[in-house]
Each structure stands twice: as structure tokens, then as C-alpha cells.
């Protein structure tokens, strides 16, 4: 089955290869199509080019969890937590802290 949204997103990425939102959207479409590894690769690329795109950390962590890579997910959540603290995004900080708590990796999280 052809994913028309993914095709359109890829076309837009050809014109705007550094567009973080388009990369994130592509990753979501890969996930929808069951291409988890490609989704993970796409979000890792997004974070490498735009480390302040906070939503990417949560999504990447969840994708890694779905692949049974909890330790890597914890590392990603912690990276995102540091970024969220630097730019004072309390909503994302809370979401990432909760993700860590659910994995039992919240022992060193300090609340504001």
C-alpha cells in the first residue's frame, strides 16, 4: 500500500531538507507504516540537526521502547530532559520525567 502522505512529505523534504517538522512528520508516517527502524533513524537525524526539537526525544524514546531498547530509551529521555530544562519547557520536562519514572529510571530526577 502506498502512503500518499509520506510521498508528499518526502517531496517537501527535497525542497526543505532541514525542516524539522517535516522530518518529524516523516518519522510518524514510517511508524504508521510499520517501519520502526526507519522512524528511529529519521528522528535520530532530526535530533542531530535540531537538538531543541523537544517532541523528538519523547517519540524516539517510545520507538526505542517498542523495539525492546529500554536502556537506549532512558538515555534519550535524559537527553531530552536536559534540553527541556535548559529552555524551560515544563510540559516536556514533565512528560520526559514521567517516561523515565515508568521505566524505573527516575531516581536522579530533580523537580523544580
Image (tube, grey):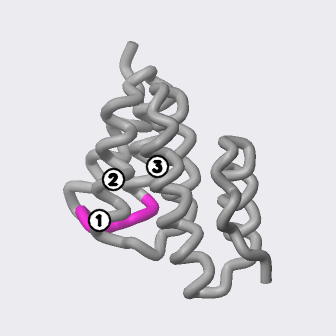
Determine whether label 3 and label 2 are within 8 Å by CB.
Answer: no
Q: Residue at x 28, y 56 (%)?
A: 45
Determine whether label 2 and label 1 are within 8 Å by CB.
Answer: yes
Name the one closer to the observer, 108 or 74: 108
How far apart marks 3 and 1 lie (CA) works out to 16 Å
Instruction: Please report whichever mark, 3 or 1, sits nearer to the chain's N-terminal start.
Output: 3
Q: Is residue 101 left or right of residue 65?
A: right
Q: Is residue 5 left or right of residue 88?
A: left
Secondary element at image label 2: helix
Secondary element at image label 3: helix
Between disc 3 and disc 1, the foreground one is 1
- The picture places residue 25, in percent across and down from the top left corner, at 46, 49
Q: Residue at x 56, y 40 (%)?
A: 62
User: Please, what is the dominant secondary structure of the magenta stretch?
Assistant: loop
- Badge 1: residue crowd in 10 Å (few <14, some 14–19, many ≥20): few
Determine whether label 3 and label 1 are within 8 Å by CB.
Answer: no
- The picture places residue 42, in percent across and down from the top left corner, at 32, 47
How far apart marks 3 and 2 lie (CA) works out to 13 Å
Q: Which residue is mark 3?
A: 25
- Badge 3: residue crowd in 10 Å (few <14, some 14–19, many ≥20): some
Q: Quadrant of residue 87?
A: bottom right
Name the one closer to the observer, 38 or 60: 60
Position of the C terminus, as image quadrant, is: bottom right
Q: Is residue 33 left or right of residue 41?
A: right
Which region is colored magenta? 17-21
Q: Number of marks in the image?
A: 3
Q: Which residue is mark 2?
A: 44
Between disc 3 and disc 2, the foreground one is 2
> Residue 48's mark?
1
Amino acid at each position: 500500500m502506498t502512503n500518499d502522505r509520506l510521498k508528499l512529505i518526502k517531496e517537501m523534504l527535497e525542497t526543505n531538507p532541514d525542516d524539522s517538522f517535516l522530518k518529524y512528520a516523516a518519522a510518524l508516517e514510517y511508524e504508521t507504516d510499520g517501519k520502526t527502524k526507519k522512524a528511529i533513524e529519521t528522528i535520530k537525524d532530526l535530533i542531530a540537526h535540531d537538538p531543541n526539537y523537544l517532541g523528538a526525544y519523547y517519540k524516539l524514546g517510545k520507538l526505542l521502547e517498542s523495539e525492546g531498547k529500554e536502556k537506549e530509551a532512558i538515555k534519550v529521555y535524559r537527553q531530552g530532559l536536559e534540553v527541556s530544562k535548559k529552555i524551560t519547557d515544563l510540559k516536556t520536562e514533565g512528560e520526559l520525567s514521567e517516561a523515565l519514572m515508568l521505566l524505573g529510571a527516575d531516581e536522579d530526577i530533580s523537580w523544580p
